[in-house]
Amino acid sequence: MLPEITKDSVSTESAPPYPLQWRKRIYAMLGLVVLLIAVVILAISVDSPYIPFSTTFQVIFSKLPFVSTSSTWSPGVEKVILHLRMPRIILSGLVGAALAVAGATYQGLFRNPLADPYLIGVSQGAALGAVIGFMLPFSWGMWNLGAAPMFAFAGGLGAVSIVYSLARVGKTLPMTTLILAGVALGAFLSAITTFLMLRSGDTLHGVYSWLLGGFSCVSWTEVEISLPFVVIGVLFISLYGRSLNVMQLDEEQAQQLGINVERTKRILLLAATLITAVAVSFSGIIGFVGIIIPHAVRLIWGPDYRFLLPLSTLAGSIFLILANLLARTILTPTVIPLGIITAFLGAPFFLYLLRQRKRAIF
């Protein structure tokens, strides 16, 4: 018989861990920050054509505030670094962070390590919106963006809004009903998307490339638009780390411990869906990031969401930057769609999770 979980026992478990555990996790975050900086410089340099690390570092260092250095590089190299590669790398880092944090949030809400950011129809709605944007007979856009990202963002949010309205029962939001509504609507939207792709004609190649994910044509405009959404969304979700810890017990017990469960679910679903929709609208459908990164962090540093969320942010950025670098360099000059790389890396890990879950059940 399982021991009874009381308020006192939960308060003890959710209290700050021993100083050694805190230090280890803080050191891990600092280490990942250093690794992220190193990965950014690596990705800028190793991309084709190769630029020496020293030149990359000097160009970036020269743009820091209150730093004055003499230019020993050509204007063309500086343009490649600052206007071609850096926006692409920064956006890939933002997308990786958004998908990883959204995945961790959904896994906490559904209490299932196999949940991902696309579980309740974001990807299907975004895909339908992108296809409509590609098929428009006229050019349309805002903030120097094409129609596809704008329609993808609207489609992702619209799909989740429909799923939420279908799943809501009075003032409650049953998680099982939400998943079932997401699966049903996702299948319906996927059917519409497939039909439109068959009718898309000359735009089929662009639609298919977008669906496979990537950062081929990225400028600072995309970075400037997505940065506030992702940063504010990730920070906002991180404030609910303790609430997610308590909600891992049981919704009824979490309610008894002072957590407004229904309001917390609505807030976290909205925040996670928003950053996912922003990520998908600029990158296309990139799978497995929201599954493998939170679970890998959980295996290494533990399930405490107060640390899981920031560690997933950094790890997701590092992973997607490296995956994008691999997609661009493994078959130079051919650029492999990023979704293929993440699926190739993530599918074996996903099968490992399924096997571990099977062992836990039986």
Image (cartoon, helix red, strand yellow):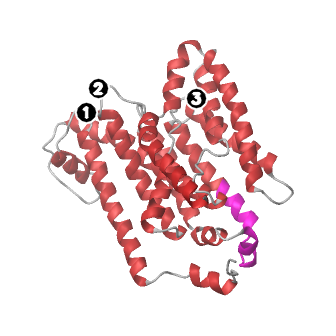
Based on the picture, tell me whether residue 266 belongs to the magenta stretch. yes
Disc on res. 4: none
Q: What secondary structure prevails in the magenta region?
A: helix
Q: CA distance from mark 1 to mark 2?
A: 8 Å
Which residue type carries mark 1? Answer: Ser
Residue nearer the viewer, 222 or 185: 185
The picture places residue 96, in percent across and down from the top left corner, at 46, 48
Pick whichever of labels 1 and 3 is earlier in the sequence.
Answer: 1
Disc on res. 333: 2
SS state under label 3: helix
Which residue type carries mark 2? Answer: Pro
Where does the C terminus fall, quadrant-wise?
bottom right
C-beta proximity under 8 Å, tags 1 and 2 = yes
Which residue lies most toward the bottom here?
A: 8
Count residues near mark 2 (Cα–Cα under 10 Å), then give few for <14, some for 14-19, many for 20+: few
Left or right? Give the position of 6 relative to 172. left
Residue nearer the viewer, 156 or 21: 21
Disc on res. 147: 3
Q: Residue at x 26, y 60 (%)?
A: 66
Q: Residue at x 58, y 48 (%)?
A: 117
Q: Which residues are magenta?
A: 251-269
Q: Residue at x 73, y 55 (%)?
A: 175
Disc on res. 48: 1
The picture places residue 125, in percent across and down from the top left corner, at 66, 36
